[in-house]
Amino acid sequence: MKHTYLAKLLFLLLFVCAGFTGAFAQTGSVSGRVIDEKGEGLPGVTALVEGTTLGNSTNSDGTFSIQNVPAGPHTLIISYVGFTSLRQPFTSASGQNVALGNLTLNENTTLLNEAVVVGYGTQRRQDVTGSVATVQAKDFVQGQVTNPEQLVQGKIAGVSITTGGGAPGAPASVRIRGNSSLNANNDPLYVIDGVPVDKGGISGASNPLTLINPNDIESVTVLKDASATAIYGNRASNGVILVTTKRGLQGEKLTVNLSSQTSVSRRANEYDVLGAQEFSDIIRANGLGSQVATLGTANTDWQSEIFRTAATYDNNISLTGSFKKVPFRVSYGNLNQEGIVITNKLKRNTGSISLTPLLFDDRLRIDINAKGTLVDNRFIDNAQVGNAVLYDPTQPVFGTNEMRYAPYGGYFQFLQSNGNPLGQAIGNPVAALNNVNNTSDVKRLIGNVQFDYKIHGIEGLRANLNLGTDISRGEGSTVTNLADFGNYLNQGRFTQYNQDKDMRLLEAYLAYSKQFGGTKFDIQGGYSYQDFVTKNDNFLDYRFDRTTLVNPTAVLTVPGGYSKLVLLSYFGRTTLNVKDRYLLTATVRNDNTSRFLEGNRSGVFPAVGLGWRLKGEEFLKDNNTFSELKLRGGWGRTGQQDIGGVYDYLPRYVTGNAAAQYQLGNGFVTTLRPSGYNRDLTWETTTTWNAGIDYGFLDDRISGAIDVYQRTSDDLLSLVNVPAGANLTNQLNANIGSLRNRGIEFNINVVPVRSEDWNWDLNFNVAYNRNKITDLGQQQEGFAGYLTGGIPGGTGSTIQVNSVGSPSNAFFVRQQVYDSNGRPIEGVYVDQNGDGIVNERDNYRYKQPAPLTVLGFSSNVSYKKLNLSFLLRGNVGNYVYNSVAANIGNLSNAQSSSGFLLNLPTDIRNTGFRSQQIFSDYYVENGSFLRCENITLGYNVGKFFNDKATLRLTGAVQNAFLITDYTGLDPEVTNFNTTDNRFEAGIDNNFYPRSRTFTFGFNVGF
């Protein structure tokens, strides 16, 4: 479905904006030079005419010029990070330039007047009462960054970002102050340039945020407590991440920026398994004579065979400037990224445009933003990473008997005597990767037009209208060749899918601000409408020839799927500032969702925040030790409704699967069957208490914040068991129980050195969070809890549990007994209940996958034109179930298999297990780690090309080193469950390893 009206709308608005330029009064210009206390010119300083978007940045010698300044008196605001802002009055004259000469900025890292992005507007940093953290572009993580969330990884206290493996564009689990829910969505809400985007993904894209180009982002702001997030009520229980993209300023001359990066990536680690000789020796030494004949004579490192040295090319160009009264920024980006597993790759083309004209004597500001993305993926089956670990190292990649292995492309495979695949054996992982072509094409457009009008006759009153959309189109197919081992008898396979997702947004609010003496207040009230429509077609499966059905008698009874979710809200906020010392923020939002039955749809989410700026009091006003000291406190309630399908409250029929077809004559019909439902579904609510201190010492050479909080979620939306015959299913979503998070966060910024040649900035942040389930409703006596965390090794086997008194997803295992040498005794566990029998009733709750402590440490030091920075981040107290070792770390496969063998991890030397012990706590390992995420070296070459261009060179290494006691591949593990659209943490199974990446890049500005 084409949306040509969007392009027409943008063109019309641009035409109108440009057309109005002739109606403005005569203008002049203003120029000057910004210097520091030593008289040196300061490049990159922002000069802005107050109350407008007229502005520019200083060049390399500190000079600036701003055009199109309306005639009359104005105030110029000069601001730069690390210096006190300067306000310089001047009077513009028609057709003339006002030369202000040298303007001196004094060093001061205090940015109390800095505008902080909050929900529906901005506030001065000193007026903020909630827990809010902002990372600007200059502080982003450097190197090859594919997904926007990677920009702030390790930068913000209480924000844990875990990438789900090393594949290009892999999804990331982002958790702000832990999980607030059990089965509902625990992801934060993302708001991009005022548009709250869909939390869910689109078919064909592993991570929806991959569709946003990180190079277009100016800042990322995280709202952590309810006082800050409640303005977004319905989806703010897990925090809010506000993304602001780059844009132009009025009067700014045209600048062109070109950046290019080339990266080389290699796997940083591998699963530790036996080599061919040691594997052969163990098979022979353990009395497995019947399997000796299965051994080959090769020496193959299967992990080396499926991994490669991967290249990435990332090129971006942007044009920023102002056409008369229309500031603009246009950008284009091209990313071509190979995965370190053969055949895996991602291609992305992005384009963005932003226009910010001022009309009607600067009373009407229009923000137009549009970001488009085209992404081509070629995915791999992560199971092949596990198969490379398992595959017999004594077998070759290619078979030696050309006739026998020719039907399989020449690749070695375990075959029967008749040449057909050996049914129980796994396929050659190199062949499987090359024989399967799993590709997708995804398109996305995020755009909005926002009008902000200062109403005539009532000073301080303005009206804001925001119209936005988020349109995604995903389609893909999987082509499996005739030579594929798993599909050889089925003559290959061709499957396809598609999905269309459309979001529409309409938000409008009125805001009024006024000052009476030393008291300032701002009040706003508004309305929000947002709907999400999802469509998809159903397709039948074909053979490789794409004409022969896999099931020739199949009948497609349902052509496709459709769903629509509507969110309707009313919101209001009041802020009060008395003498820049006593602060109040009060918020309320009423949300309505179509996900629940009428009568349960409405939720009210209030919040209040208080602040006391002690630095403004007389007893600290002239104190030179304290440069800032503010106490904050807040309480609020937010909501959650994002679980399951959008019609789970309705009795309905759903399409059955292939195993539930009904035969009519010679044909098989896919059935429609009644589905379970819950008419009582309603809002899950999270109540948060937060207390904090913002501090600064020695002219803010030392600054930071401390926060303590408690979050309690009630009426948890959870997947619960249903008594037999009580519904149409044995499990469904319901409101039951409560969950609590308690924690403390600490952040400190230190500037040890700041001089003409040397500058050094340090940041350290640490957060501690304790999670506990406090209630799960009325349960039968002896009920262990709701089992979760599926693992291989048995049908329906799980390794985690949600139960009262324990953290969510605690490991549910048996306590291993060890001999005098510290070696685990096979099959011997502690009899926890003392009944003389060791079984599932002796499982106990042991540790948790979520870290107790998350920390980050970064350093940025510069000497003249040279710059060196690094980022360390780590987790403490997180545990990982080593599923790979538990599944294959035994001799059972060799004992029971016929005609093939599976490799063993080196841990078999420590255990000697002959059969699987998948429930042993031996495999629950401490996953605490310290990772060097990034080291970057940069050099500012300076001007060239007749002083018309500047050049900066950078070199970076990512994932430089990892320190951990975990014996598996990587302790930072999270898996995305596509069935429930949620992340499952703490189980290491078929994990795509992270790479170590070396990047060289340059940036040219004209």
Image (spheres, rainbow, N blue to C red):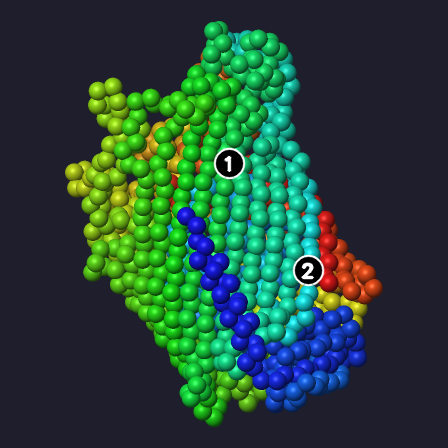
Label 1 vs label 2: CA separation?
Answer: 33 Å
User: 10 Å neighbourhood of mark 2: few (<14), some, or many (≥20)?
Assistant: some
Say which mark, if any, is on residue 509.
Answer: none
Height in image: 83 above or below 965? below
- Determine if residue 750 is in view: yes
- Amino acid type at mark 1: Thr
Q: Mark 1 sits on what residue?
A: 439
Out of 654 and 924, give the one closest to the viewer: 654
Q: Secondary structure at mark 1?
A: strand
Q: Position of residue 336 (x, y in %)?
A: 62, 43
Q: Position of residue 934 (x, y in %)?
A: 66, 51
Q: Mark 2 sits on what residue?
A: 257
Height in image: 975 above or below 508? above
Out of 867 and 882, give the one closest to the viewer: 867
Height in image: 947 above or below 532? below
Q: Is residue 68 left or right of residue 457?
A: right
Q: Secondary structure at mark 2?
A: strand
